Amino acid sequence: MESHKFFHFEDDDETIDIKIPEVVDPSYGMYVWPCAPVLAQYVWFNRHSIRDRTVLEVGAGTSLPGVVASKCGAKVILSDDARLPKCLENCRKSCSANGLVGVEVVGITWGRFSADVISLPAVDVVLASDCFYDTKDFEDVLATFCYLLNKNKHAQCWVTYQERSSDRSIEHLLTKFDLQCTHIPLGMFNADEPHLAGSNLPGDHTIQFLLITNKMAVT
């Protein structure tokens, strides 16, 4: 069964409205998680800096952050696990629901470097919402980030994740892949509220925002 969530972003005299299709399905990527509107808010807050830049959303699922980026004038590529065609189709449905054309959707499986990954154009920003969900995937997620950041020395990964256990950490993996991470308080981009963009998300969940770059990043 398909339904829709609606999101409204505004600042000064600028507003956008986003409609996101959701499907009741066991697949994680078929509905909007609490991290997504937080990342979308960061995209909206930085909309002028991403205009005409190339933005890749990984693990996109319903693609809220990527759709917002596209609405803000970025050149967006959406991706999800190549083994999950329903999630890739959901990315396309989100584009269609918001009148977006020309947004490429590709299959990218974390930790696997297929032709779709290798042939990606130069990327300025990588978006990742709640990709640190299952600890068994953490290393593969960061291996993918590492590849993209090594290929695009100036790029940044904008990442939101939900705190589910104090025992979960990516610090040792950041060291392994020679990456650096900056925590950005949600209040710095007006995302420290239980309800964002006119939705009931993120609710009472604890969400963190990370800015991940290569330690040798070109500034």
Image: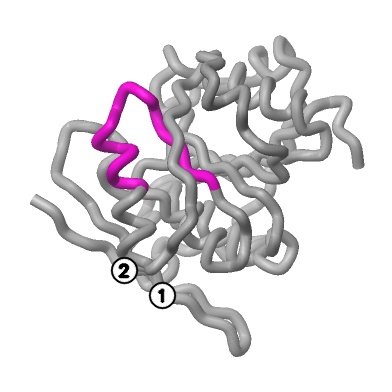
Q: Which residues are the magenta region? A: 77-91
Residue at the spot 34% in from the left edge and 50% down from the top edge? 92
Residue 215 at x, y = what percent?
84, 26
- Say which mark, if any, is on residue 17: 1
Question: Which image quarter is the C terminus in?
Answer: top right
What is the three-letter code of the residue carrying label 2? Phe
What residue is drawn where x is 62% and y is 23%? Answer: 118
Vertical arrangement, residue 163 with respect to residue 114, above or below: below
Among numbered discs 1 and 2, the one appearing first in the sequence: 2
Residue 216 point in image, percent of width and height: 88, 26
- On the question of residue 5 being in view, the answer is yes
Residue 167 in view of the camera:
no
- On screen, residue 110 versus residue 81, left or right, reads right
Which quadrant holds residue 27?
top left
Q: Residues within 10 Å of mark 2 (few under 14, many from 20)?
A: few
Label 1 Cα crowd, 10 Å radius (few <14 / some 14-19 / many 20+): some
Residue at 50 percent across and 36 percent down: it is 58
Residue topped by disc 2: 6
The residue that appears at 36% across and 42% down in the rendered structure is 61
Q: Secondary structure at mark 2?
A: strand
Label 1 is placed on what type of residue? Asp
Q: Nearer the viewer, residue 61 or 159?
A: 61
Q: Are marks 1 and 2 in contact (CB under 8 Å)?
A: yes
The circle drawn on residue 74 is: none
Residue 184, horizontal then vertical, whole percent: 68, 48
